[in-house]
Every structure is written in structure tokens, then in C-alpha cells.
Amino acid sequence: MSDTEILSFPQCFVCGSENPMGLHVEFVPDSEQGCRAEYTVRVEDSGWPNVMHGGLLFTLMDEALAWALCYAGLRGVTARGDVRFHQPVSPGSRLLVTGRIVERNRRLITARAEIRQRERTPDLVAELNGTMFVD
């Protein structure tokens, strides 16, 4: 089984195609060491009325880090993540999620993910600087 097949487990909450409560996000390669995906915020993604839950924003970025590793031929898990939220997001917003590897040091990878609004300025919603353990 390839790393891509392992990472795209059908029941995965973020990318799984068979999880009825999942987000069904499809990440695609976006450079030699990166990935991207688009996501439209649903009402059921809200934490407060008319505001997307911050935990779901983190979840999208964490998944982007994992896919960036996968597309670089690596497999790993998040060891640490430093998140910064820049603006709230409302249901119906179209988001662009990106992830990329910044640096590799033996079994540790430094990676970065961002979420941007597709139709609004300022467009940066959130950013995640992460450290990943690789197998």
C-alpha cells in the first residue's frame, strides 16, 4: 500500500470520501513539496453563529501538512503546531488551504500551512507552523 493510499483512508474525517460526517476535502500536489485544496464552509462547521469553528480551521491546516509530506514521498504525524488566526470565517466562504515543507532535519520536518479566503481582502484567515515526525 502506498503512502497516498494510507493517507487517503476512506473514513478520514477530513479527506475520506466515505465518511458521512466528514469534510470530503481533496488535496492535490501544488509544488514539489506542497499541496492545496479548496473548501466551502458549511453552516454545520460553525462554532458560534455565523463563524467557522477554529478547531476545524486547525484541522484543515493539519491535514495540509500531512498531504505535503505525502506528496514528498514521506509519512508522518504532527508533533507540534503553532497556529495564528487572523480573521473569522462565515458559512459560504470559499477557502484555499495550502501546505508545504519548509525544512527537513533527519526525522523532523518543519512545515507551514495557510488558509486564505478566495474572494475577500485581507484574505489570510489562519496560518500553522508545524513540526512533523516522519517514519
Image (cartoon, grey):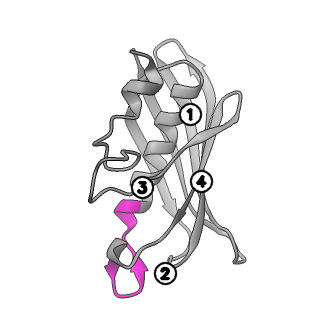
Q: Quadrant of the C terminus?
A: top left
Can you say whether 85 is above or below 10 in the image? below
Which-is-in-front pick, marks 4 and 1?
Answer: 1
Earlier in the chain: of badge 2 and badge 1, it is 1
Query: For the residue marked with disc 3, what is the amino acid?
Result: Phe
- Can you give x and y, in whole percent of width and height, for residue 24 in the image? 41, 53
Which element type, helix, strand or loop, lies under badge 3?
Answer: helix
Circle 2/circle 1 CB separation < 8 Å:
no
- Name the residue tied to disc 3: 58
Q: CA distance from mark 1 to mark 3?
A: 15 Å
Is 39 part of what is drawn in magenta? no
Could you say which disc has been placed on residue 9 in the image? none
Circle 1/circle 3 CB separation < 8 Å:
no
* Highlighted magenta segment, given as a residue range: 47-56
Could you say which disc has been placed on residue 114 in the image? 4
Q: Quadrant of residue 81?
A: top left
Is 52 part of what is drawn in magenta? yes
- Can you give x and y, in whole percent of width and height, for residue 129 in the image? 53, 44
- Name the residue tied to disc 2: 90
Could you say which disc has been placed on residue 68 in the image? 1
Query: For the residue marked with disc 2, what is the amino acid?
Result: Ser
